[in-house]
Image: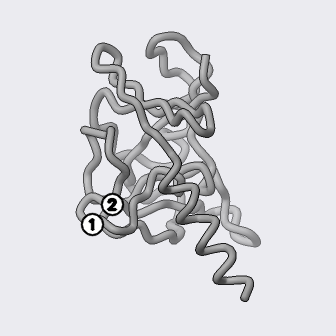
Amino acid sequence: MKKSAVFFLGMTLLLTAVFQRDEVTGIVTDTQTGLQWQDNMVVGPMNWNAAMAYCDRLVLDGTDWMLPGVEALETIVDSTKDAPAVVDGFEHTVSKHYWSSTVSQNENYRAKYVGFFDGNIGSHNKDYLGYVRCVRAKK
């Protein structure tokens, strides 16, 4: 019963989420969560430390960007699509692994990713070369 409720909630959030793209900046805003996503270019591949630093230094219509946690990154997955499995509104997504800021539990040398070829979640050693999509709270 729990799985059904979680699935239903997830589908409800997916169906009600509205992603609006600013064509000038390439920023995609989730009007439900208020999160803004960088989508002005494909960024990567780079290791996890470089990804964290890249988002921290990003200046795109302002600052305050960060590497998203795995839960936030999952909100832009559209599992009804593949290659790439990303919600409508994004133009610059490769069907590869995107780093999250979430470190694997009990394995500090690994961090989680979301694979945008099918929306799967996994973890890699932090020296793996993955892609980056930065996020921030709506300005």
Q: Quadrant of residue 26?
A: top left
Residue at the location (33% across, 38% down)? 89
Residue contact at pointers 1 and 2, CB within 8 angstroms: yes
Residue 13 quadrant = bottom right
Looking at the image, residue 36 lies above or below residue 109:
above
Instruction: Please state the horizontal and vertical placement of residue 88, each as a whole percent of the image.
Output: 32, 46
Q: Farthest bottom residue?
A: 1
| Residue drawn where x is 43% and y is 37% of the image | 19
Provide the residue designation for mark 2: 85
Cα separation, mark 1 vs mark 2, equals 4 Å
* Secondary structure type for disc 2: loop
On screen, residue 133 versus residue 36, left or right, reads left
The three-letter code of the residue at mark 1 reads Asp
Q: Is residue 67 left or right of residue 77?
A: right
Provide residue 42's location: percent of width, then percent of height.
Answer: 28, 38
Pointer 2 local density, CA inside 10 Å: few below 14, some 14–19, many at least 20: many
- The answer to whether 72 is drawn above or below residue 31 in the figure is below
Quadrant where the C terminus is found in the figure: top right
Question: Looking at the picture, how far across and down is residue 54, in whole percent?
Answer: 48, 30
**Outermost residue, top side:** 62
The residue lying at 58 percent from left, 33 percent from top is 35
Residue 116 placement, left or right of 52: left
Query: Residue under circle 1?
Result: 82
Answer above or below: position of 105 versus 26: below
Quadrant containing the N terminus is bottom right
